[in-house]
Amino acid sequence: MKLHEHAFRDLFHQFILLPIDKNDPHIPDFFKEFPNYHDANALLLYGYIDHEAGLTFEVLSAARHENDTTTLFPGNDEISVKLRSESIGDEEIVLLNKLTPNAYDEKIEQIHKFYKADKGIELCRKIKELDAYRHADYPDDIAVIFYDQEKEPEYCWVRCEDCQPPRFFGTLLNEPKIIEGIHKNDKVVFNLIEVKDGFFVAVFLR
């Protein structure tokens, strides 16, 4: 499956393999910075969320994947290579959810420490009822229906920063075209409302 065909929960704090075609003239230069790249045909990545930059993957090492067998090579602690999900969304990947390679613990610990989100953001990420409205590359960004009884509703993006379900708090990311009196970068509150059995919508009500 391609990366963009997976939900962010399949990729968040998980290991994946990104196949590499060494005959591709556009192969990234950083590939040669990793040990054993001559023998490799893939990169080992680790997924996490940067609250501002979205779903991101740290390149941990080169790897070789053949016939369902994966060989992992040493990493390179001298460099840090990050791939945003939007740049590799159309690439075929292999999930390695059962993999627990201890060789990369230090780098992964640094990722968890540096990109640790506030408790409110972490809670927002756990609310599966929001998943239908999450941006594919920016899981903390929610498409919210802004509704004013006197105007047509419109969708706007809100970056979630805290929640007390069913109320959510965040920053408006784009300038509304229809709803007046609120603007890009304003702090807003929206609600998660069940409109049918098991079907929810994220709504800002005036």
Image (cartoon, rainbow, N blue to C red):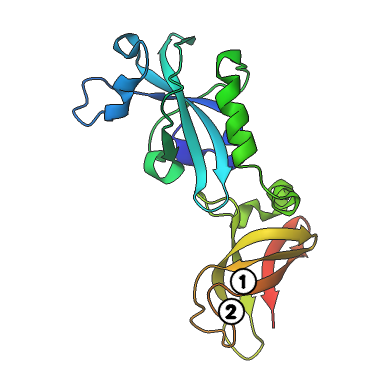
Residue 120 visible in this rendered orientation of the protein: yes
The 10 Å Cα crowd at callout 2, few under 14, some 14 to 19, many 20 or more, is: some
Q: Position of residue 90 (x, y in %)?
A: 38, 39
Q: Position of residue 49 (x, y in %)?
A: 57, 43
Quadrant where the image shows the C terminus: bottom right
Q: Nearer the viewer, residue 74 or 175?
A: 74
Q: Are marks 2 and 1 in contact (CB under 8 Å)?
A: yes
* Amino acid of disc 2: Pro
Q: Is residue 23 left or right of residue 96?
A: left
Residue appearing at x 68%, y 74% in the figure: 204
Q: Is residue 35 left or right of residue 27?
A: right
Q: Nearer the viewer, residue 190 or 47?
A: 47
Q: Position of residue 193 (x, y in %)?
A: 76, 66
Q: Nearer the viewer, residue 82 or 65?
A: 82
Counting residues from the start of the chain, the first of labels 2 and 1 encountered is: 1
Q: Position of residue 1 (x, y in %)?
A: 46, 31
Quadrant location of residue 98?
A: top right
Residue designated by label 1: 145
Residue appearing at x 64%, y 36% in the figure: 113
Residue designated by label 2: 153
Above or below, 21 against 114 in this view is above
